[in-house]
């Protein structure tokens, strides 16, 4: 045998040693798996286990066999034999393809192999791994043989009671598993746990697999709300499936053992809505700079299970002001970058593309969706506004302290209040009660400010709040500022404005009259103030309308009152009819031909000085403090809390408490914890710790009474004498 032939023999021995080592480790484990499967499930599962084990062994042998290839042999031989001069690869090459120098080198290597044959290349046995696998297999076989014998084979008619069912032994749970399969859109892999308590995303599919010895006649899953799910028997196992939509408490009840079954908890983790942040620009209001051609917008969206790759950029261009404002909608689809759970959306908007003009705004909002199926959650970002300022008014320099700042008012107009109320009603099902009430109250505040602004035209007080900016709802172009050409045709008391000189002489403010030869409205301080600001703080001097318009506006104010009332009471659906009627009346006021401003002073009723320090209280209403609101009746909570003070808690109190929990789930942070505590006390009424824990939860759920002023203590003897002297002696 030549040296090369001996080398090939050594190579085959090394490869077979690797295969035998895998078999030495895996074969005992495969035998143990087959024995356990045969003992617990029967021959068919045992054969299936053997097939799976053989497949796994084959998959483990293939890479070991391929690892000991020709490259491995050349590297190993070059490392062991220095005399081969790292040229072992020439021994396996085609001799006809070698160059003369390579053929000479190969001949030298063959000569050295004849003089010194190749040594053994087989790797050493992994004795520790083989011993460990053998011991584990022996222990598994012994445990399987010691396991209780199986019951009747699969296929026995379930209507025929088995021998174990006829036995008087109590069924005992000997095996359990709970498989959690989250929805596909979450990207979470399925898991299997050996416990009954679990947390999983809402929409997950749960599968219970239970095994009892001896077998019961039936097993149910009983939930705290009264639902029951019967488990199906599949061979020796009992299985059930459930689509987890909300958190629940349940117990596993073999037939006849409901009282001894403990409660378990399933927590459904709701899918959070996406969160959108505006990164650029840093401020929500941006003024269009000269020569600015584009507007850069950068958003960042996050979600617990991933944000959709596409998002919609909603662009709204405003045109006009007040109730006459018009909106032009545009939609741009953006493609996000980054990881699915945190995407970044960027866009450059050219205002000229959307026809933005001076005095108009371009409002941008990003609408993103998450990956929830079948109905994704849609969220819109906060608005970013690009404003092209209007042309400055000529001659208004230096009047910053005198002119009233004019802000855009379409955010606080009657039409906008209607839009906000309708949008709030559409989102009612998604909002909690507190959040819904706060948003409704905020719309009611806007309605109040709008009502006060219109009320100024009727001489009403402002109720101490800041005035809302004008919205352009009432026409201002018809307001007279200087009517010198009409002085001869009108009387002094006809309610019309007869010029600055005439007004200054009669308005009672001490303004100097304007010379008759002065140009009307030019260079006069009062005219400038009247043009760019508010000249007087007297409501009657600027709020007189013609009678028909006053009645129409008064009707609009009454409707606004009712709209504000229901909005403040978190009832926007009842406020909408009043808000619509108010808008119709405002439109009628806009169509009024003329608004008259009378320059008259405010006349207050004179003060009766004779009543001062007289002690007479005639005509003065009582000033008692109003009583605070009564706390909501929680009779069930009170009765249960008192009953828990002793071990003999009344069962009727717990029933009433359970009904209260079903009717008031929002009053408690974790209703399931309260239900679980009630079950503990019902199971063991003598458990003092259980009763104390339940009382603590009830105490936290009770509503605190509103704070009221305490009544003053009754007067003592000295106080009574003092009061009697005050009543008996006349005041000086």
Image: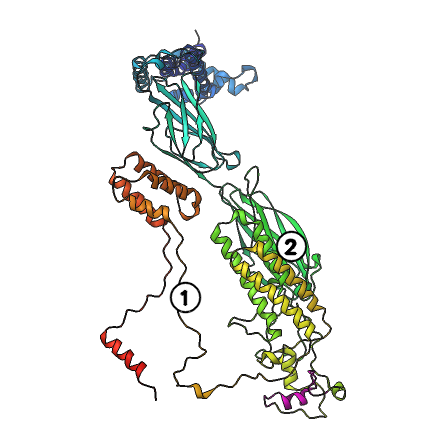
What residue sits 41% from the left and 66% below the top?
Answer: 626
Residue at far top of view:
1
Name the element at disc 1.
loop
What span is in magenta? 491-510
What residue sits 58% from the left and 55% below the top?
Answer: 574
In the rendered structure, the answer to whether residue 106 lies left or right of residue 353 reads: left
Give the spatial CA distance, label 1 vs label 2.
51 Å
Q: Nearer the viewer, residue 268 or 379?
A: 268
Residue 692 pos. (x, y %): 27, 44
Queried whether the magenta region covers residue 506, the answer comes back as yes
Tag of residue 626? 1
**Image-quadrant location for residue 576:** bottom right
Characterize the local packing of mark 2: few (<14), some (14-19) or many (20 or more) Cα atoms within 10 angstroms. many
In the rendered structure, the answer to whether residue 125 lies left or right of residue 3 reads: left
Q: Is residue 233 above or below residue 394?
A: above
Residue 465 pos. (x, y %): 52, 70
Name the element at disc 2.
strand
Residue 290 pos. (x, y %): 65, 66
Residue at far left of view:
717
Q: Nearer the viewer, mark 1 or mark 2?
A: 1
Characterize the local packing of mark 1: few (<14), some (14-19) or many (20 or more) Cα atoms within 10 angstroms. few
What residue sits 70% from the left and 66% below the top?
Answer: 588
Q: Quadrant of the N terminus?
A: top left
Q: Nearer the viewer, residue 19 or 499?
A: 499
Q: Nearer the viewer, residue 648 or 66?
A: 648
Residue 172 pos. (x, y %): 32, 21
Q: Is residue 480 above or below residue 306?
A: below
Taking the image as drawn, is residue 716 in sight?
yes
Q: Is residue 645 above or below residue 72?
A: below
Q: Quadrant of the C terminus?
A: bottom left
Residue at numbered disc 2 = 315
In the rendered structure, the answer to whether residue 56 lies left or right of residue 683 reads: right
């Amino acid at each position: 045998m030549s040296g090369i032939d001996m080398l090939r023999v050594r190579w085959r021995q090394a490869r077979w040693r690797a295969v035998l080592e895998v078999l030495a480790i895996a074969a005992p484990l495969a035998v143990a798996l087959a024995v356990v499967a045969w003992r617990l499930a029967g021959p068919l599962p045992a054969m299936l286990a053997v097939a799976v084990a053989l497949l796994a062994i084959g998959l483990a042998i293939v890479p070991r066999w391929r690892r000991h290839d020709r490259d491995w042999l050349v590297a190993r031989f070059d490392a062991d034999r220095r005399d081969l001069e790292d040229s072992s690869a020439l021994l396996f090459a085609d001799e006809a393809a070698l160059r003369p120098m390579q053929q000479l080198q190969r001949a030298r290597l063959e000569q050295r192999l004849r003089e010194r044959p190749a040594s053994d290349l087989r790797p050493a046995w992994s004795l520790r791994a083989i011993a460990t696998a053998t011991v584990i297999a022996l222990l598994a076989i012994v445990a399987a043989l010691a396991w209780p014998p199986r019951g009747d084979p699969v296929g026995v008619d379930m209507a025929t009671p088995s021998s174990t069912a006829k036995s008087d032994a109590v069924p005992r749970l000997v095996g359990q598993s709970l498989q959690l399969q989250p929805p596909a859109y979450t990207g979470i892999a399925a898991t299997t746990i050996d416990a009954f308590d679990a947390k999983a995303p809402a929409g997950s599919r749960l599968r219970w697999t239970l095994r009892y010895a001896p077998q019961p006649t039936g097993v149910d899953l009983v939930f705290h709300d009264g639902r029951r799910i019967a488990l199906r028997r599949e061979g020796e196992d009992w299985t059930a499936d459930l689509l987890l939509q909300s958190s629940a408490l349940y117990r596993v009840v073999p037939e006849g053992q409901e009282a001894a079954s403990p409660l378990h908890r399933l927590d459904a983790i709701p899918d959070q809505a996406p969160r959108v942040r505006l990164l650029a620009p840093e401020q929500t209001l941006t003024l269009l700079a000269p020569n600015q051609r584009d507007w850069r917008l950068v958003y960042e969206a996050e979600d617990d299970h991933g944000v959709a790759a596409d998002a919609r950029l909603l662009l709204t261009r405003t045109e006009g002001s007040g109730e006459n404002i018009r909106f032009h909608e545009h939609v741009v689809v953006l493609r996000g970058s980054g990881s699915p759970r945190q995407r970044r959306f960027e866009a450059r908007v050219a205002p000229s593309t959307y026809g933005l003009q001076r005095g108009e705004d371009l409002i941008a909002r990003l609408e993103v969706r998450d990956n929830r199926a079948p109905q994704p959650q849609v969220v819109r970002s906060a608005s970013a506004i690009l404003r092209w300022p209007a042309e400055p008014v000529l001659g208004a320099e230096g009047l910053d302290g005198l002119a009233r700042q004019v802000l855009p008012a379409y955010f606080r107009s009657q039409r906008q209040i209607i839009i906000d109320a309708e949008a709030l009603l559409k989102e009612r099902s998604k909002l909690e009660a507190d959040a819904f009430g706060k948003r409704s109250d905020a719309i009611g505040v806007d309605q109040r400010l709008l009502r006060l602004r219109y009320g100024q035209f009727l001489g009403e007080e402002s109720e101490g709040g800041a005035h809302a900016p004008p919205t352009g709802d009432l026409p201002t172009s018809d307001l007279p500022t200087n009517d010198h050409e009409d002085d001869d045709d009108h009387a002094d008391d006809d309610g019309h404005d007869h010029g600055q000189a005439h007004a200054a002489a009669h308005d009672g403010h001490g303004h100097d009259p304007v010379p008759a030869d002065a140009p009307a409205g030019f260079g006069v301080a009062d005219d400038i103030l009247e043009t760019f600001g508010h000249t007087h703080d007297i409501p009657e001097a600027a709020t007189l309308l013609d009678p028909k318009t006053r009645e129409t506006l008064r009707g609009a104010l009454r409707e606004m009152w009712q709209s504000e009332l229901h909005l403040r009471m978190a009832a926007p659906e009842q406020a909408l009819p009043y808000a619509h009627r108010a808008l119709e009346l405002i439109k009628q006021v806009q169509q009024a031909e003329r608004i008259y401003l009378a320059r008259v002073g405010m006349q207050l009723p004179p003060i009766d000085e004779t009543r001062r320090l007289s002690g007479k209280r005639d005509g003065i209403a009582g000033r008692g403090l109003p009583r605070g609101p009564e706390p909501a009746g929680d009779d069930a909570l009170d009765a249960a809390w008192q009953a828990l003070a002793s071990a003999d808690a009344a069962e009727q109190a717990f029933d009433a408490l359970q009904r209260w929990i079903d009717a008031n789930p929002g009053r408690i942070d974790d209703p399931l914890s309260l239900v679980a505590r009630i079950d503990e006390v019902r199971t063991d009424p003598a458990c003092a710790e259980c009763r104390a824990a339940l009382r603590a939860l009830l105490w936290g759920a009770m509503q605190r009474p509103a704070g009221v002023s305490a009544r003053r203590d009754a007067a003592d003897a000295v106080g009574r004498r003092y009061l009697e002297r005050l009543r008996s002696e006349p005041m000086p």
